[in-house]
Image (spheres, helix red, strand yellow):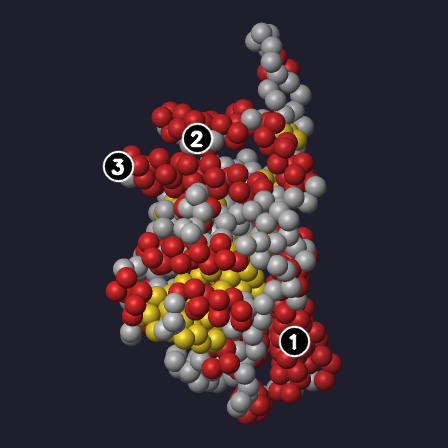
Amino acid sequence: MAYQILKGFEQSFRWYSRITGAAQQRFEQARWADAQAASRERIAIYDQSLAAVVSDIYQSLHPHLQDKTFWLDLKHQYLKQLADHPQFELAETFYNSVIGRLFKHRRIDDDIMFVLPSRCYLAGQVRQSLVNQFDASGTINQTLLAIMGRYRFKLEFEDMPRDLGYVERYLRDTFSTRELARIRSVEILQPVFFRNKAAYLIGRMWADDRQIPFILPILHNRQGQLFIDTLLTAKRDLSVLFGFARSYFMVDTQHPAEVVAFLQELLPNKKHFELYISLGYYKHGKTVFYRNFLQHLQQSQDLFEAAPGIRGLVMAVFHLPSYGVVFKVIKDEFAESKKITRQHVKDCYRLVKMHDRVGRMADTHEYVNFRLPRHRISQALLDELLDVARSSIELTDTEIIITHLYIERKMTPLNIFLEQETDEQKIHHAIDDLGLCIKQIAAANIFPGDMLHKNFGITRHGRVIFYDYDEICYMAERNFRELPRSDDPYALDTLSVAPDDVFPEQFEHFIVGKRHLKALLKQLHPELMDPRWWRQVQQEVARGKLKDVLPYPESQRFIRRYPAGPPG
Ligand SMILES: Nc1ncnc2c1ncn2[C@@H]1O[C@H](COP(=O)(O)OP(=O)(O)OP(=O)(O)O)[C@@H](O)[C@H]1O
């Protein structure tokens, strides 16, 4: 059985690698729709592989008739096989999933699974073959030429000398001559990162013993040639690129732990689990998250309580004030206005998980039978959960078990932000970003449904992100209509409205409440209130047009920074 489980994991990883390994070809051939399909397929692999292994196991033995010695021995046998395994940590997670399935996640016991990792992965052990080293003691141009010579694509660059000129100019503008003179070497991860329509080289420069992490995005021009769009070195830009509202990167490697360790050095503020998730190992990310969470529980004393903000009609949302996530439990009954079922809610959350989230929709992680220590739950929260989500709650003397929940990154709800913020500039930026967020979600083929500002959060980087998915649908599923133009005061009363009709001219009343904010949104994003704009996006989506959504500010692009081109 231990062999069977490992074989199942390896098959699953091979399948994963096959899809990931073809990312460069999809990029070179500009097969963007295929890239999206590949992302969805890759997310689905895990559950399919798991189901196959569990069904095989049931063919050969009855798990519930085995005693504890059997499970202890199984873990021991499995561990023996992992001795030199390059993805041992992922294989442990797969094992946990199998045991979780067999016991319906009711036994969480380190004796029979890997609640704790079997061994530590020490940072600083990244193998040489994973990182390309470049000597930087020559000129900047020589170093850049050496780098671009190493990363080969089956496409021409539109104008490589121009792009290298841009990079050099950016470096000279951003760092002092003394600092640049100190740069002795450059290290870049050997695997290229692919996502949406971009390829990224990710690495660092060493200026004496100070590292300067960077990301170099490469895009296609309209003629199908490549160009370097910018160089990112600001911490914020690097962090946003790995944000929780983005799709997962495609990074072809047999050594994910080492890629993550390297990334962790570049991005010390990112959590280990976030990096695993950003590479698409979202199940292992969940394992690492859970370990981090257990550790946090031990080191903290605060109580779980309802999340700040307006209570949801569909979700009961709570948090631990000292920890950066929220927990969402589907309520037993929904308010009258919500004509949806529990399954519909789950389907919508699943859709978002599989979809390109374009940096604007928070990723969620689904847990079954999630256990929390009872003494850490505030009485008010316990009463509330028992009141609104009784069917998802089980109580023991020491624990509360939530049979189904979603975990999602905590943000400041936009309504709270707009009430509390006094800096006009920040408010202006948030409203602008709210409009942009809705537009980008629409261009990615999702109609958000309920666009009230309370359904958005704002991150510490000031980005507005959508998080309420129970009313989403594809763009094609709505009719974007004009309100009747008539002097007849009864025209509105007699207007016949089908369930799928929406009237964008009315959106201004359904996004932000305060009059001056409505006016600002309308001034910054008048298109949102124009049915023609919505229909146009709908048509573009139907034609398969995939909008470019850059994961960094437009102002960072070389063409914006240096409209006159590089010097010389
Ligand atoms: N990621 C998050 N970070 C911080 N707070 C959140 C987050 N997600 C939800 N909340 C809080 O919980 C509330 C309810 O969440 P959500 O909008 O997901 O529930 P809902 O039941 O689907 O809402 P609705 O009634 O609009 O359908 C939000 O208004 C917000 O105050």
Quadrant in which the N terminus is drawn: bottom right
- Tell me whether circle 1 and circle 2 mark residues in contact (CB < 8 Å): no
Q: Residue at x 47, y 76 (%)?
A: 131
Please report whichever mark, 1 or 2, sits nearer to the chain's N-terminal start. Answer: 1
Label 2 beta carbon less than 8 Å to ligand 1: no
Q: Nearer the viewer, residue 325 or 240?
A: 240
Query: 266 and 74: which one is in front?
Result: 266
Residue density around tag 2, few if under 14, some if 14–19, many if 20 or more, within 10 Å = some
Q: What numbered label is drawn on residue 422? A: 3
- Exactly how many numbered labels are in the figure? 3
- Image position of 59 (left or right of 376): right
Which three-letter amino acid code belongs to the residue tagged 1?
Arg
Within 10 Å of disc 1 (Cα), the crowding (few <14, some 14-19, many 20+) is some
Q: Which amino acid, mark 3?
A: Thr
Judged from this view, the residue extending furthest toward the right is: 59
Residue 14: numbered disc: 1
Q: CA distance from mark 3 to mark 2?
A: 20 Å
Which residue lies at the image location 63% right of the left edge and 72% below the top edge?
17
Q: Is residue 147 visible?
A: yes
Mark 3 or mark 1, earlier in chain: 1
Which amino acid type is marked by label 2? Leu
Q: Nearer the viewer, mark 3 or mark 2?
A: 2
Disc 3 to disc 1, C-alpha distance: 53 Å
Eye-nearest disc, 3 or 1: 1
